[in-house]
Amino acid sequence: MDAFKLLTRSTKLKSLTGQSALTTSSRIPSSGEAKNPQLFRYAEDPGFLRDGNDSKKRKRGDDQSNLIEDDVLNLDFFSSPKGPSSASAPNPIASKSQRRSHGEGADDQDGSDQNESVDESHVRSLLKAHKIKVMDLRDHEAIQSVKTEKLGAKRKRRKKEEPIPVLSKKQQKAARMLFPHPLTSFQQLRKKYHISRRLLENIVEQGITIPTEVQMGSLPLLLEHYSSTGNSQSPVTPEPDLLVVAPTGSGKTLAFLIPIINKAIRHHHENPKRREILTVIVVPTKELAGQIVNEGRKLVSGTGVKITSMRKGMRLDCSDDDTNQIGKEAPLSDSVSGSDVDDEDDRADEGGNNKMHSANNSRSRNTVTKSDVLVTTPLSLINSLSNNQTKDIVPMPSVQSLVLDEADVLLDPLFREQTFGIWNACTHPKLRTSLWSATMGSNVEELAKSKIRERQQSLSISEKTPLIRVVVGLKDSAVPNVTHKLIYAATEQGKLLGLRQLLHPTAMITPLETRLRPPFLIFTKTIARATALHSELLYDIPAEAGGSSRIAVLHSDLPETHRSEIMKGFRKGEIWVIITTDLLARGVDFRGINGVVNYDIPTSSATYVHRVGRTGRAGREGGIAVTFYTQEEVPYLKSIRNLIETSQELGRK
Ligand SMILES: Nc1ncnc2c1ncn2[C@@H]1O[C@H](COP(=O)(O)OP(=O)(O)OP(=O)(O)O)[C@@H](O)[C@H]1O
């Protein structure tokens, strides 16, 4: 009897278009990098752009542009009003003729490759094809006031007493849509945005050649203010605060690292004797912090920029006075003491990071970090700034960029107070904040908006900067390139049986599309269940194949060194299966993971999105997400099923 089939009333989800079971299993994430890391890559078919201009689609586009009245088109949240610099900063919503009259055409010919000579309709087609939506999130009043100012000035010329019309909601929505030129090649980073040559070399050296959608949409916004001269003394447009929602594995890390590293390189250039923390990146887990530092170190190689992860006992040197100079001993005080970080220790990978702390505990307690970029969990930094919460939080006046990665979790009640504490500690008047995640509810947007407003008021900052939102694909949806299986297991015993069949697939009874080849992750809802499942499966892998060493359990109760060892072992391919909790659900990037098993059903859609997003990264095809559920877990099924259908729909479009 086919026990597996008996237990598996597999839900009837439509299969992805053109994705047969055979192709799913013949090309799996562990078989290598995708040729193209983009998720919505049918955009590369030139026919698509032709289609994008066909009558049906054009009609939709025209509808949209029809909504944008002439006057609304004049709204330009980016450009500085006049001056030579504004000529070459492409106004994302100005008409072609307006841009020509501002001399933008000349810039196209001068500095950049042919992609930049694209006209506005092509820009819109590109953004649409790659499912990139950019929107100004400022309050209606702010938009209205820009509108009013512009209209007011115009009408003054026409007829003084004429009342200023109020924008309808529809018009306001249309006015908020922005169409910035997307980044179509990494070479543009240098040609157009003048990033450091070495930084570009470091990107290219990693074999990164095609920008992903989130990079296409967000990098121009974060770099545009230097696009004219390459000189930070004269930024041409205000750098915005940014909210980015883009699928898991779509390259958000690179999208926020490139601008902040470039900023640090400029800072060193302009202040050769000064090193201070310019950027704080806050993440929910130590695993993610370690990973970002590793990614960052590849990018900063040879640039003089230093990126460090926050460790227990580490003291920060946040002073912005001249005593904080490279090569000089930092001043000692209550919150700032000790010597500089040993580069050797500091350069280590995740395991090494911890090595320093455990092997040299007393020394690390006095460590000062004089890094340019600090990556930290909320609690580690708060503890460091408040002497383990025994004193007031020390401000960090030098920090100019605050990055909240997995922002929805960081603004969740669990972390919110700590995250806001860090945000408040960043007192630089020009602080820019960016929030990144694959899922972001509207409450997060509202929280971010009100925090930015509150901070500006409390620090009496009069400069009004744009708050821009970039969305790639559909907000809060799972990656479209993963095959989802919902498997009814009836009971706990049924789950175990089902899982064993994934571990030991038998051609006869395991459906082809459900075969899961290592490496993969198994998620449980609690540490206790993860531990129990690990004990249960420990001897399932035969000794000839490596036995119990191939399967590990990872959760937050384990010592940091142990956690790092497991992460390293998995990355090296020594460990094949990790049983874990939601500790590894977010941000962690193991490139060639073939699948994810939800041994316990996720209790929220966001958790589902992040867990299954550990596979199918950077455009890799063939990842599988298997979710077991028992009778008790049925109530959670509906939202997950809807989410899967939406993501499949997205993949088909
Ligand atoms: N342009 C690119 N070309 C090829 N690979 C890329 C590119 N950009 C990023 N990657 C790779 O894609 C993988 C996923 O990137 P990253 O971890 O930044 O995703 P993410 O969007 O932050 O995902 P998550 O939401 O899960 O945190 C990484 O291995 C990264 O090196």
Image: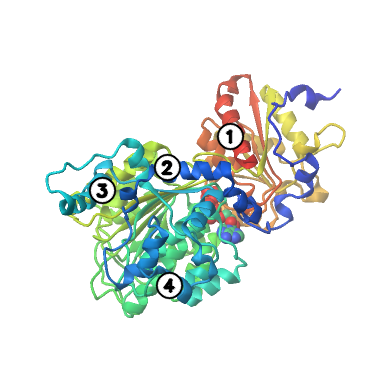
Q: In this view, does 405 lie to the left or right of 233?
A: right
The residue type indicated by label 1 comes to Thr
Q: Which residue position holds label 2? A: 408
Secondary structure, mark 3, is helix
Q: Position of residue 430 (x, y in %)?
A: 27, 61
Q: In this view, does 145 lie to the left or right of 311?
A: left
Task: Say which of marks 1 and 4 sits in front.
Answer: 4
The residue type indicated by label 4 comes to Asp
Q: Which residue lies furthest to the left in this view?
A: 161
Mark 1 closeness class: few <14, some 14–19, many ≥20 residues within 10 Å? some
Nearest the camera: 120 or 428?
A: 120
Task: Say which of marks 3 and 2 sits in front.
Answer: 3
Q: Which residue position holds label 3? A: 147
Q: Which of marks 4 and 2 is nearer the N terminus?
A: 4
Q: Which residue position holds label 1? A: 646
Q: Which of marks 1 and 4 is nearer the N terminus?
A: 4
C-beta proximity under 8 Å, tags 1 and 2:
no
Secondary structure, mark 1, is helix
The residue type indicated by label 3 comes to Lys
Task: Say which of marks 4 and 2 sits in front.
Answer: 4
Q: Where is residue 143 in the image (x, y as percent from the top left)?
A: 28, 46
Q: In which quarter of the image is residue 233?
A: bottom left
Q: Position of residue 375 (x, y in %)?
A: 42, 58
Q: In which quarter of the image is residue 488?
A: top right
C-beta proximity under 8 Å, tags 1 and 3:
no
**Which residue sits at x=83%, y=50%?**
544
Q: Which residue position holds label 4? A: 107
Q: Which of marks 1 and 3 is nearer the N terminus?
A: 3
Measure how far apart labels 3 and 4 are at the Cα level.
Answer: 28 Å
Say if residue 326 shows up in the picture: no
Nearest the camera: 21 or 193?
A: 193
**Which residue sits at x=46%, y=62%?**
257
